[in-house]
Amino acid sequence: MPGIIHIYWIMRGAGIMDGISSSAVEGIMYTINQKISEELIKGKNASFVLSPLKREETTIFKGREMEGISPNTIGQMLSSQSTTVPIIMMIIIIMAGGMVISSMGMEKENKTLETLLTLPVKRSSIVAGKIVGSAIVGLLMALVYMVGFSYYLQSFQQSSQINLADYGLTLSIADYILIGISLFLALFAALSLCMVLGTFAKNYKSAQTLTVPVSILAIIPMFMIMFKDFDTLPLMLKIVLFAIPFSHPMMAMRSLLFGNYILVIGGILYVAIFAFAMVMIAVWIFNTDKLLTGRISSRKR
């Protein structure tokens, strides 16, 4: 009977840079196997001589003890959540946000915004209509991209006999509802911010440059979440990541897998407050002549 070496891994995060290198352990195991094989080479059981040791792994990840699975396996199986959601969220924010800002620039360039403002419609209704309409289109785009990108990633992933559901890593219907709420609010917040930025666009060309800040705010959390787990980030980076409203749906799925409801619900509340503030600013701008001038200047007293 082969000897058994128990290996306990302490895994702190599921990001790309959080992976635990097993090369050192593999080297030690190989050396021990070779030394024992040299002593047992005269034995009759060739398979036992070539592999006298059997490895049993246990990974401790976020307070959960998972037997028979290595950190690399967990990281690979969580890679879809680590890459799909952040990339899709980044693409949707950039595309939908650019659409809102560009539409504002085109309306000013074509002089149709003045006509819209003369209609007997509340300015708040105009703002809400623009944001909600773009948000619905963005959600449809997110659904299409998410399905397509998931199939794309599956073509590169090797099939595994390990099911994360056996370790309690599953999402309930309530979890998916929270993810949907977080996604919608983040998209709503992004479009509200784009609406505010779009008021400064004088034409379609200038509107393109205003999409840069939104793109940066979408790209930064995407890379941070892909390469590092939120729990393993320094405190300052945690604050920065939490302050960016677009990052919360990117973190929601992985957080819910491990029961971190405080981070998800807190993020939803923060994004809702941020979105409400942006909508109020947009409505205030629409109620002033600053919408047409694209400048906010202080009056001299």
Image: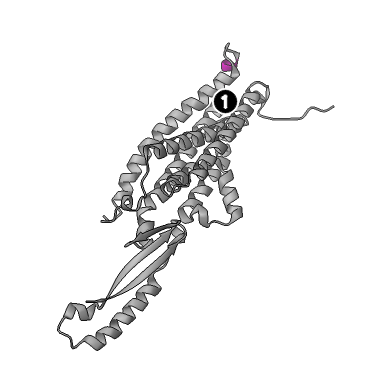
Residue 59 falls left or right of residue 104: left
Q: Which residues are magenta?
A: 113-117
* Residue placed furthest toward the right: 301
- Whether residue 95 is visible here, answered yes or no, is no
**Label 1 sits on what residue type?**
Glu
Residue 20 falls left or right of residue 153: right
Label 1: which residue? Answer: 109
Of the pair 70 and 210, the residue shown nearer to us? 70
The image quadrant of residue 160 is bottom left
When the figure is inspected, residue 146 is found, relative to residue 68, above or below; the finding is above
When the figure is inspected, residue 162 is found, relative to residue 120, above or below; the finding is below
- Circle 1: element type: helix
Q: Residue at x 33, y 52 (%)?
A: 164
- Whether residue 72 is visible here, answered yes or no, is yes
Reply yes or no: does residue 116 show up in magenta. Answer: yes
Quadrant in which the N terminus is drawn: bottom left
User: How is the rendered protein coloured?
Assistant: one colour
When the figure is inspected, residue 185 is found, relative to residue 257, above or below; the finding is above
Of the pair 148 and 20, the residue shown nearer to us? 20
Of the pair 159 and 106, the residue shown nearer to us? 159
* Residue placed furthest toward the left: 44
* Residue placed furthest toward the top: 120
Quadrant in which the C terminus is drawn: top right
